[in-house]
């Protein structure tokens, strides 16, 4: 089969790899219908996250079960399913607590020795604990499939940030980051009842999506100017809840600067490039809470799925470029150059 492989920074190739096969009774083999490129994939593409030459890549996908191992109880050939970006056994103490990303037997798609999502098929370990079944009819609905794909990562990650930030009905929220996760954070905040949502971003195509998703205000400034602009909008105080969806030192400094005393920051931006920029003294003095990390999206899918199926929320606009598998290298280039927000792959 064909799959996406990274050989070196800026060297992404689509090439022939061995077909996935059942290795353990709890495995399934899944044929990929939709996948995508994540902003976090770009750190490997740019050489800022180490990868072995020839390593697979991609961690967001949904598809059809082609074969199920003898120990799989919840799925059979022909089922339409979505995969969260981490597999998990569904039976350990962490899984029972909802922290599926800490499952001792879990792992990330595209890690050494595992299949990546940007290919024609994937072997899924611990299928019963990992996959979530989708309505069969969705397989023939292109728009709905695209929306459902967001459940594999960005929608659940945005929701995780909103939960970590303590978004509740009537609250004021600010979102740092205008990428797909930040935009889904706007959607999540609106879904959880936020009254005012300030999106920080300078790209109009993205801030237009933010407004569609529920943002009431947009701040285009960065750094100290952004802090001043948000505080001016809020009468001198910061936001009750702040979503940090970038992961740089500057973005974290901004998040702290725009948080109201006694407020909370939900952080889901993958840290990269430098320190976190956290000043614990400032956070201590102002009673600012910090919560977040790797989103356990498998835990959130059952909660978010009904709203996607009903159309109550529609995250599909974050996918602004659709390509075939052979075009994946160009898709990485488009996202790296910020000419695309998030690239949808149709194998």
Image (cartoon, rainbow, N blue to C red):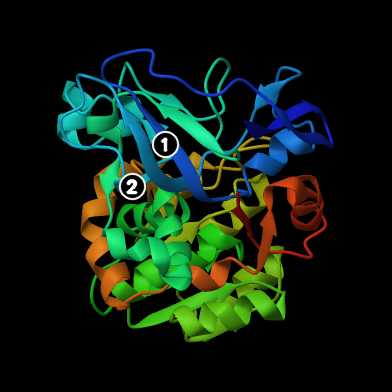
Q: Residue at x 35, y 39 (%)?
A: 65
- Helix, strand, or loop for circle 1? strand
Task: Name the residue tied to disc 1.
Answer: 30
Q: Residue at x 69, y 29 (%)?
A: 49
Viewer-proximal residue among 74 and 168: 74
Residue 52 in view? yes
Residue 231 in view? no
Left-right relation of 41 to 242? right
Viewer-proximal residue among 87 and 240: 87
**Tag 1: Cα neighbours inside 10 Å, few (<14), some, or many (≥20)?**
many
Q: Quadrant of residue 41?
A: top right
Residue 180 rendering spot, x and y as whole percentages: 56, 61
Viewer-proximal residue among 20 and 35: 20
Residue 132 rendering spot, x and y as whole percentages: 27, 45
Q: CA distance from mark 1 to mark 2?
A: 9 Å
Q: Quadrant of residue 89?
A: top left
Residue 332 rendering spot, x and y as whole percentages: 75, 48
Q: Which mark is residue 130?
A: none
Task: Name the residue tied to disc 2.
Answer: 81
What quarter of the picture does the N terminus occupy?
top right
Left-right relation of 16 to 334? left
| Marks 1,2: beta carbons within 8 A | yes
The total of numbered circles placed on residues is 2
Picture layout, residue 60 above or below residue 93: below
Q: Residue at x 31, y 45 (%)?
A: 78
Left-right relation of 328 to 56? right
Picture layout, residue 273 above or below residue 286: above
Residue 61 rendering spot, x and y as whole percentages: 48, 46
Answer with mark 1 or mark 2, whichever residue precedes in sequence. Answer: 1
Q: Residue at x 48, y 40 (%)?
A: 280
Left-right relation of 289 to 273? left
Picture layout, residue 261 above or below residue 73: below
């Amino acid at each position: 089969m064909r799959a996406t492989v990274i050989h070196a920074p800026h060297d992404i190739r689509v090439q022939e790899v061995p077909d996935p096969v059942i290795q353990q009774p709890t495995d399934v083999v899944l044929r990929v219908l939709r996948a995508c490129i994540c902003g976090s994939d770009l750190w490997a593409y740019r050489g800022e996250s180490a990868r072995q030459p020839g390593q697979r890549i991609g961690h967001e996908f949904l598809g059809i079960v082609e074969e199920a191992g003898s120990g799989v109880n919840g799925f059979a050939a022909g089922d339409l399913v979505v995969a969260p970006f981490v597999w998990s056994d569904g039976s350990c103490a962490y899984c029972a607590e909802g922290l599926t990303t800490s499952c001792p037997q879990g792992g990330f798609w595209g890690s050494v020795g595992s299949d990546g999502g940007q290919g024609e098929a994937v072997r899924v370990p611990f299928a019963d604990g990992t996959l979530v079944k989708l309505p069969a009819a969705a397989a023939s609905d292109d728009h709905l499939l695209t929306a459902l794909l967001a459940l594999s990562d960005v929608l659940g990650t945005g929701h995780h940030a909103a939960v970590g930030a303590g978004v509740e009905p009537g609250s004021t929220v600010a979102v740092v980051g205008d990428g797909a996760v930040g935009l889904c954070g706007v959607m999540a905040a609106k879904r959880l009842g936020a009254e005012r949502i300030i999106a920080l971003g300078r790209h109009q195509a993205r801030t237009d999506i933010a407004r569609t998703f529920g943002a009431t205000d947009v701040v285009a400034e960065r750094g100290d100017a952004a802090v001043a602009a948000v505080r001016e909008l809020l009468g001198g105080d910061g936001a009750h809840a702040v979503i940090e969806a970038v992961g740089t030192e500057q973005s974290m400094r901004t998040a702290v600067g725009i948080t109201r005393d006694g407020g909370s920051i939900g952080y889901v931006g993958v840290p990269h490039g430098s320190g976190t920029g956290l000043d614990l003294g400032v956070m201590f003095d102002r009673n600012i809470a910090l919560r977040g990390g790797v989103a356990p999206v498998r835990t959130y899918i059952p909660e978010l799925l009904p709203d996607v199926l009903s159309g109550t929320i529609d995250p599909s606009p974050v996918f602004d470029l659709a390509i075939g598998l052979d075009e994946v290298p160009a898709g990485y280039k488009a996202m790296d150059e910020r000419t695309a927000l998030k690239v949808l792959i149709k194998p």
